[in-house]
Image (tube, rainbow, N blue to C red):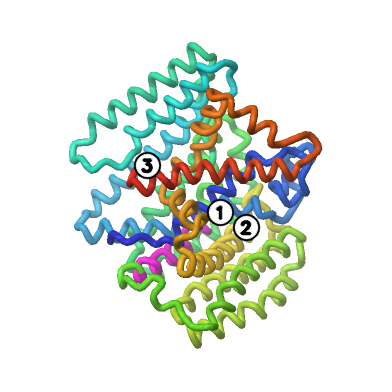
């Protein structure tokens, strides 16, 4: 299967934009909905008593959704090529360790907080050293290249430690990539052994639901996180987020069939689609507002009934290929919203069942809208940039901190970057962040067009 599902790449790129953008916007001066809702301005101290979610709290679960949907696309492609069960399991474990190593490597290779030019130069060299280690190579014997990349990475980390005073510790890792590594391991194995047995996958999801609810009630997540000897390698939420990823693999199975048939966007037509797809986006906006405002679960379901009814009606008449998508989205939304009063609110920290189900529902609707954009404006700048960056998620995720920012410091352009955010003008800081992230993603998309990819 050589054809990619462009919408999934676009949505993945959009979430990476959101992750990086939300990390570099002005601190403490924007409205609360521009930050993680449990880290409100101006102090941004974590307050787990706050419930609800903002758009910032959506980007990570949507990325998990994209990972889950991509598992069947790559997995079935490998199965069709004749990969054995043993080889699939071994390659899954290998990718887990590569992602696990990456979560440490990109952090330990970043010296941009140190003074002087040399730390910036070695940060750029560290970014370049990741190419031989993670770049997709066509040559059969890639082991020498991988070993050279690993040696370069280790050498630069050692230079950072002994020359720049950077601390090497098991606690210093990128928590998002670290979590994604475990989610990929569990999710990929669950999908493989249930790929032809959906009932079994559904039963596993039910068991995960029960496990999550019981362990949360018993306070296990807090107990494990409170132990520094445990929390660096294990977090109970590794299992909780599977409530999001496992349903996403079912969406991925549907996507694979569409890609296999070769008519991803060809059968999207008619005047009704110009109501269907924008309505899906408006439904997402409404849900985001409802969850942010902590509206009652009953009110959310009642208000969401109207747009979902219209979406189902149009799908039945004109776009039957989206009926399964809508059914999954509606079911997850109902289940997630129903859990809000049981759990005392929807929160990211601690991760709640309602958070996993509701954000997965929103992800499905956003994927539907992404189809609309990729059908009608596939050649637009934003679609090209986001989809190109979405094809290269590892590179896109670290390119700003590990390449663009140190390059600006080396060349002196960082003065222009800082001047673009004058004191007392937070909107200018937002615009600066958006431009900087778009520039970063454009650079990555150019590499993607030249078939230069990183892959764990």
- 273 on left or right of 302: left
- Mark 2 or mark 1: which is in front? 1
CA separation in Å, label 1 and label 3: 22 Å
Pointer 1 local density, CA inside 10 Å: few below 14, some 14–19, many at least 20: many
The residue identified by callout 1 is: 61
- Percent across and percent down for residue 65 are 50, 57
The answer to whether residue 374 is visible is: yes
Contact between labelled residues 1 and 2, with CB atoms less than 8 Å apart:
yes
Which mark, residue 355?
2
Q: Magenta part of the protein: which range? A: 242-258
Q: Please tell me whether mark 2 or mark 3 is closer to you in this view.
A: 3
Q: Quadrant of residue 46?
A: top right
Q: Is residue 256 magenta?
A: yes
Dot 2 or dot 3, earlier in sequence: 2
From the viewer's side, name the closer residue of 138 and 455: 138
Label 2 and label 3: CA atoms lie apart by 30 Å
Is residue 415 one of those drawn in magenta? no
Image point (49%, 53%), residue name = 386
Q: Residue 263: x and y, percent? A: 35, 73
Residue at 45% x, 51% y: name it: 390
Q: Nearer the viewer, residue 184 or 108?
A: 108
Q: Main secondary structure of the magenta part?
A: helix
Name the residue located 41 percent from the left edge and 40 percent from the top edge. 99
Residue highlighted by disc 3: 454
SS at circle 2 = helix
Mark 1 or mark 3: name the one nearer the start of the chain. Answer: 1
């Amino acid at each position: 299967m050589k054809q990619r599902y462009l919408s999934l790449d676009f949505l993945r790129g959009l979430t990476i934009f959101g992750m990086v953008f939300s990390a570099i916007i002005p601190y403490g001066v924007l409205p609360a909905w521009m930050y993680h809702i449990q880290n409100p301005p101006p102090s941004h101290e974590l307050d787990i008593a706050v419930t609800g979610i903002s758009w910032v709290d959506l980007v990570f679960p949507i990325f998990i959704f994209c990972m889950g949907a991509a598992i069947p696309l790559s997995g079935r492609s490998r199965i069709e090529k004749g990969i054995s069960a043993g080889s699939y399991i071994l390659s899954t474990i290998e990718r887990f360790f590569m992602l696990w190593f990456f979560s440490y490597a990109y952090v330990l290779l970043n010296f941009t907080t140190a003074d002087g030019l040399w730390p910036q130069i070695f940060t750029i060299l560290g970014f370049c050293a990741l190419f031989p280690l993670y770049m997709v190579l066509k040559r059969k014997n890639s082991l020498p290249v991988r070993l050279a990349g690993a040696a370069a990475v280790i050498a630069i980390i050692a230079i950072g430690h002994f020359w720049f005073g950077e601390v090497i510790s098991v606690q210093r890792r990128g928590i998002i990539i670290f979590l994604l590594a475990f989610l990929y391991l569990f999710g990929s194995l669950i999908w493989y052994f249930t790929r032809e047995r959906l009932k079994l996958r559904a039963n596993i999801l039910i068991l995960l639901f029960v496990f999550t609810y019981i362990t949360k009630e018993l306070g296990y997540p807090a107990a494990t996180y409170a132990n520094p000897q445990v929390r660096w390698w294990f977090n109970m939420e590794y299992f909780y987020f599977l409530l999001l990823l496992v349903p996403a693999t079912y969406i991925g199975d549907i996507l694979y069939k569409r890609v296999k048939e070769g008519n991803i966007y060809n059968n999207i037509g008619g005047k009704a689609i110009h109501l269907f797809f924008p309505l899906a986006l408006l439904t997402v906006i409404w849900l985001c507002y409802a969850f942010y405002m902590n509206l009652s679960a009953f009110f959310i379901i009642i208000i969401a009934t109207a747009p979902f009814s219209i979406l189902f009606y149009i799908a039945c008449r004109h776009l039957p290929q989206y009926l399964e998508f809508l059914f999954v989205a509606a079911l997850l939304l109902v289940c997630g919203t129903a859990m809000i009063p049981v759990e005392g609110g929807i929160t990211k920290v601690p991760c709640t069942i309602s958070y996993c189900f509701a954000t997965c529902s929103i992800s499905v609707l956003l994927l539907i809208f992404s189809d609309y954009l990729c059908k009608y404006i596939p050649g637009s700048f934003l679609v090209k940039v986001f989809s190109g960056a979405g094809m290269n998620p590892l590179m896109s995720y670290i390119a700003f901190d590990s390449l663009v920012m140190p390059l600006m410091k080396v060349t002196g352009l960082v003065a222009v970057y800082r001047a673009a955010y004058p004191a007392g003008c937070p909107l200018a800081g937002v615009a600066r962040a958006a431009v900087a992230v778009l520039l970063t993603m454009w650079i990555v998309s150019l590499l993607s067009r030249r078939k230069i990819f990183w892959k764990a």
